[in-house]
Amino acid sequence: MTFAEQILSFLTQLDFRVTLPRGIEVMQPFETKETLNACTAFYQKFYGDNKQRQLIMGINPGRFGGGVTGIPFTDPLRLAQHCGINNDWPQRQELSSVFVYDMIAAYGGPEAFYDRFYISAISPLGFTSLGKNLNYYDDKVLQERVRPFVITSLRQQLEFGIDREKAFCLGEGKNFLFFSRLNNIHHFFKEIIPLPHPRFIMQYRLRKKEEYINLYLERFKRPAP
């Protein structure tokens, strides 16, 4: 199986058997035909090979990005404009997706970037509470209940052809702490390298966005052009 075929098989067979705390809901974008079509087009375009890649781990998908398209940090607008995959969703942008695709452009474009990296998330499925995004670690009960799902999902993705030397974690605080603790127990990677989360950058450090892009490129060991 190609890298793309393994990803698509994983996404369509996600087994989320978690009793959620009251008021919290899980997003299930892969149950819709449009999302599956977008994922199929995206992954076949950029991952139709058997190359080894490095893993970049986010937190969990948001309502306007991966929670719609099924592709981490990829909103409908960037899916069309940057990845060349047209779609019928409202062309609404997500802040994190804006940063990620500006960084990808500085790296050399989607073809060069996805040839080396695979982006996922600690939880491949996102959560909402009262209609707003919820990070898995924002609720302690949720965090503990999703832990088995997180571990199983990560082990499955490692089989795609992931470089086990190092992984990158988006989020230098709670996400990095949770990922690091899991790694200390299960030894998924020799090293986990933290990076400031794209939403933090766009919301609180927008004036320094170019500096953060260069920081990403430096840690990826790819100089800006």
Image (cartoon, helix red, strand yellow):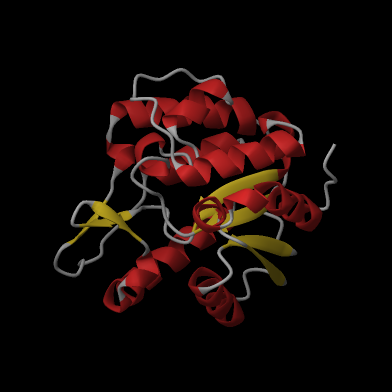
Most extreme residue toward the front, as rendered?
207
Name the foreground residue: 65 vs 198.
Answer: 198
Residue at 26 percent of width and 53 percent of height: 132
Residue at 61 percent of width and 61 percent of height: 196
Name the foreground residue: 210 vs 56.
Answer: 210
- Please give left or right for residue 195 compared with residue 125 in the image: right
x, y percentage for residue 215? Answer: 74, 56
Residue 161 in sight:
no
> Is 95 rendered above or below residue 165?
above
x, y percentage for residue 18? Answer: 25, 65
x, y percentage for residue 10? Answer: 45, 46
- Please give left or right for residue 9 compared with residue 57 in the image: left
> Is 2 rendered above or below residue 147?
above
Residue at 71 percent of width and 46 percent of height: 210
Quadrant including the C terminus: top right
Name the foreground residue: 55 vs 17.
Answer: 55
Residue 117 in sight:
yes
- Please give left or right for residue 200 compared with residue 17 in the image: right
x, y percentage for residue 133? Answer: 31, 54
> Is 79 rendered above or below residue 178?
above
